[in-house]
Image: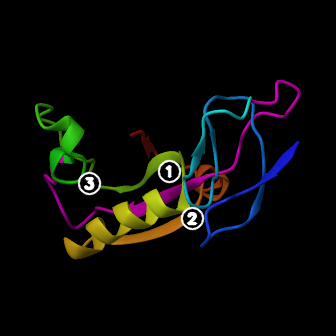
Amino acid sequence: MQRRCTQSSCRRVFPIGRTAPVRCPYCGTTYPRVLPDPCSAQEAFGYSILADLTNHPHVPVSRFFPQYQRWPRFFWTQPLAVGRYLSLWQAQQICQQFRREGITADVVSTRCAQRQLRPFFRI
């Protein structure tokens, strides 16, 4: 089953997945009253960020994700994929944060990031 996004800047058609709440994968608009489709295939649409952290050791995770303020961890110093199945808007926001810090980052589909066999940092 498919649905057209009601966001005025989006208006794209997207398939309804089997998870609730139903979200537009392009802009992230949620539809809490729309029931998920139990007959749909596994949801495999979304975006990830490919970040190259080889020249940036000891970058704290809490700098980019405030929900991990008390988590004293650092990103690995290697190329990695950040996030799985994010909306395009979320992925672009995170990518801009990486670029402001001088880290090379690009937004790609999650499927493309999985094909490159990079380690994932899940949000």
- Of badges 1 and 2, nearer the viewer stands 2
Q: Nearer the viewer, residue 38 or 4?
A: 4
Q: Residue at x 56, y 60 (%)?
A: 27
Q: Report the amino acid beneath label 2.
A: Val
The CA distance from mark 1 to mark 2 is 13 Å
- Return the residue at label 2: 108
Question: Colour scheme of this structure image?
Answer: rainbow
Q: Nearer the viewer, residue 10 or 117?
A: 10
- Return the residue at label 1: 118
Quadrant where the N terminus is found in the figure: top right
Is tag 1's residue or tag 2's residue first in the polypeptide sequence?
2
Label placed on residue 77:
3
Question: Which x, y percent locates residue 68?
Answer: 20, 36
Q: Residue at x 27, y 66 (%)?
A: 97
Write the start and end of the magenta stretch as one range.
Answer: 36-60
* Disc 3 crowd, CA 10 A, few/some/many (<14, 14-19, 20+): some
The CA distance from mark 1 to mark 3 is 12 Å
Q: Nearer the viewer, residue 24 or 99?
A: 24
Relative placement, left or right, of 63 versus 93 is left
Tag 1, which secondary structure? loop
Is tag 3's residue or tag 2's residue first in the polypeptide sequence?
3
Q: Residue at x 64, y 52 (%)?
A: 24
Q: Report the amino acid beneath label 3.
A: Thr
* Magenta span contains residue 120: no
